[in-house]
Image (cartoon, coloured by chain):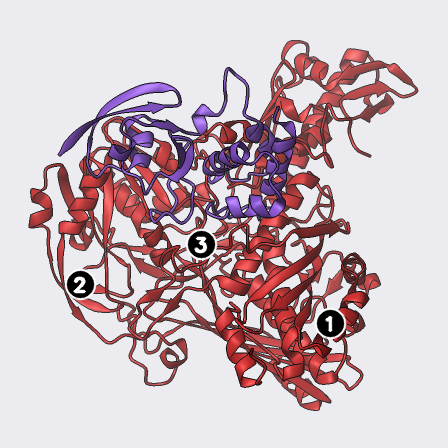
Amino acid sequence: MKTDAKICGMGHSMKRKEDPRFIRGKGNYVDDIQLPGMLYMDIVRSPYAHAKIKKIDTSAALKIPGVLAVIDGPTLEKYKLHWMPTISADTQMVLPIDEVMYVAQEVCAVIATERYIAADGADAVEVEYEPLPVMVDPLKSIAPGAPVLRKDKKDKKDNLAFHWEAGDRGACDNALAKSDVVASQFVYLPRIHVASMETCGCVADFNSAEGKLTVYMTTQAPHAVRTVFALVAGHVGLSEERIRIVSPDIGGGFGGKVPVYPGYVIAVAASVVIGKPIKWIEDRMENLQADSFARDYHMKVELGANKDGTMTALRIKTIADHGYTNASANPMKYPAGLFSICTGAYDLKHAFCEVDAVYTHKPPGGVAYRCSFRVTEAAHAIERVVDVLAQKLKMDPVELRMKNFIPTERFPYKSVLGWEYDSGNYPAALKKAMDIIGYEALRREQKEKRSRGELMGIGVCSFVEIVGAGPSKDFDILGLKMFDSAEIRVHPTGKALARFGTKSQGQGHETTYAQIIAEELGIPASDIQVEEGDTDTAPYGLGTYASRSTPTSGAAAALAARKIRAKAKTLAAHLLECSEADLDWVPGKFFVKGVPDKAKTIQECAFAAYTNMPQGMEPGMEATHYYDPPNLTFPFGSYICVVDIDRGTGEVKVRRFVAVDDCGNIINPMIVEGQIHGGLAQGVGPALYEEIGYDEDGNVFGGSFLDYYVPTALECPKWETDKTITPSPHHPFGAKGVGESATVGAPPAIANAVVDALSHLGVTHVDIPITPEKVWQLLRKAGAAE
Amino acid sequence: MKHKISVTVNGAAREAEVESRLLLVHFIRENLRLTGTHVGCDTSHCGVCTVRLDGEPVKSCTVLAVQADGRKVSTVEGLEQGGKLHAVQEAFTEKHALQCGFCTPGMLMTCSALLERNRKPSEQQIREAISGNLCRCTGYQNIVKAVQYAAEKLP
């Protein structure tokens, strides 16, 4: 039952509490921060993918009035800060001593009194390079005898960053060999970049009198950053209690603001050395060219089945291009993330998957693009190969899916690769999507159009997400367990302040967390102030990514609120002079059973906690909860889209897109729908337009918005969204998380629609992004181009 | 070389000595400390720096401050008048047309200009008008709805 609109608990489409400042231009993003005496930093970057640095001549730069210092590798080496760990416990140069390993790598940094002067200084630095052989192809890099790239790693004899596998290889091989048919497909998911509208940056402020470092930075995980800074810079006197990370308003994150980039560390070092605040803000080209990338998975996907379409076994072998270092933001135990969700929505008896991660001369790869843990890769692999199988069996892709879905009565379901799916109802979501889009009518329309030579395709995708990392027994990042937290303080007047270990980047936590607490305590959500992102005040947590905030901190909010409600009940019994057992609760008040007028509101209880508590009771009304989830959550959905293809140009137009999502119980339907809309746009982008490519010398294509094509309002169709609700049985209020679902589910739906449009021409697969040229080449090959 | 410029910003006369190369966006953000206007790409693709110059929406990362000399600039901070939000500001909240808020100021400036030249824009006209403003969060649909809503609400 919903709380009334005044309380605005779960299920209300409450208008966002963060909006009033944003619509007035009063947000506080990192580049808006201005400190007295602040200096600016600009970075000199490598034009080569692999080269020896012979000389860095800073003399001309230092002659420019206002240029104060140039910081290079040898400067940092003096403090042993020229290397740092990545969040996957690999290593990375902060600044190089003598060798660069990718285009746009940081070479040195100029500190100046003004932004433009710092840029002048960076232009004036002369670096002499000796180009060295470049390795850009991961398939060559992994081949025996390839030159070893990471010579800094002692005894490293190859370019393998790691090998990871899941499942029973022998049993899977055997089952595939015995299958009547095997659909086999190479699938490449290219490098893409989150391209949040705000780039990365920081203001590092070392106060030498107090020995305290404050860093305002674009980070999705401020507490983890604080601990990492303490661990890697303890030897220069940075101690964790004297490090404060403040994550201000963030202009989009999507995973790209999880890593610690060299720029942050250089700015911190510069502030410590110079003793003044240093601002560093990336420009867009630096952001696109040097910050960590997502995807870059080369997958061989094989799906076996019996003649009747019953799936038998799935095998996926992957070569993952991680670039110069493994910069993934994955839990330590899962270096390839949660890729083993690749069996998706299907009841498969056998499966095996493996990933070989490879070093190349490219920027660090392996972070998120609105999906941290390789779920997008897994979903694309299975959803694409299911369609390949359908084509092979001459079955409708919907029929094949329905036949193989995990039966609804089998939840909680243990997958062959080891996950326990908490809840699901896959046929219901697909059926709903089919009804909304009018699937049968579309198939008839397609048939008619095909007879006239027009190209129209219908694409289906039934994905399963795996989010809410995660249970401490399995999940940690650099040893830090992946719990998350909430702290609630109810003031004497019944208003509340709540703080969290997560950090919103647009998801609306200030609103949704307030609604969770409102639901539990009956305090109006408008009376609850939510704060995140300041490590001096917020309780410890691992941050916001991987759709984990609602499953972890959201759960913590509910449980902390329940602790407060328990105390309020004692206070209410005290005030009403009855026993607690005589009290009932409706949101906002306790009342004596059967006597609704004999009641005390939560606000009255709060006041009593400070003014009139029973003898012996600890005063105050506060609670903190650190939530260690018992399991992950498994949101899911079915998407169907319709595309039309221009035979003259090969251009794909998404005509309709129906998304039916199930993320369990919903806190704020308006915000959930907004998350899905945004996720769908970030599905259309990679499906049709976005790619960061490289030439054989390691030069980047797609390094600016001129050629990295982020979809505009004209490329995005009118989304048609709907939902089913299958609560998570183990989450305190049955929610699952939603931020990434649409980005996981949309690309295979679009790819399947394009292949469906071209299937009668013998096309069985096309890799994303499905550019007009790729389609036109396929049409030309089939003799079908106009 | 420095130039003396006078610009009317959100109705107030502002004078400054600026370098020839100073971008209008940096003049607004750093000299005037009006930080609602953001920087997103430096190459005039993303539109988060959109302000109105003599009423026309322009990307202020591609305009020099000296080019604004003697002209009128309006920014997101000038939309609210006498404590009353502009219809597009109200509409963006009402229709959940913003998430991270970083593109929002530029988007609001583009949309307010659109509604002045076309009081009842069609969905396609709205999409075309905002196609120079990138948003990575909303998938645009709620922005379109917000503009339609504001169009209805405008007196």
The residue that disc 3 covers is A478
Q: Earlier in the sequence, mark 2 or mark 1?
A: 2
For mark 3, does the 10 Å Cα neighbourhood hold few (<14), some (14 to 19), or many (20 or more) residues?
A: some
Residue A611 found in image quarter:
top right
The answer to whether marks 3 and 2 mark residues whose Cβ atoms lie closer than 8 Å is no
C-alpha separation, residue under disc 1 versus residue under disc 3: 52 Å
Rendered residue at 89%/21% (across/down): A593
Disc 1 element? helix
The residue that disc 2 covers is A98
The chain to which mark 2 is attached is A
Rendered residue at 79%/33% (across/down): A2
The colour with which the image depicts chain A is: red
The residue that disc 1 covers is A446
Q: Earlier in the sequence, mark 1 or mark 3?
A: 1
Q: Give x and y (percent) for residue A759.
A: 66, 79
Q: Which chain is purple?
A: B
The answer to whether any part of residue A493 appears in the image is: yes
Q: Give x and y (percent) for residue B84.
A: 55, 19
Same chain for mark 1 and mark 3? The answer is yes
- Direction from residue A573 to residue B33 in the image, left or right: left
- The amino acid beneath tag 2 is Asp
Q: Give x and y (percent) for residue A647.
A: 58, 74
Label tally = 3
A176 w.r.t. A247: above or below: below
Q: Residue furthest right?
A: A594
The answer to whether marks 2 and 1 mark residues whose Cβ atoms lie closer than 8 Å is no
Closer to the camera in the image, B77 or A465: B77
Quadrant of image for the N terminus of chain B: top left
Q: Residue furthest top?
A: A611
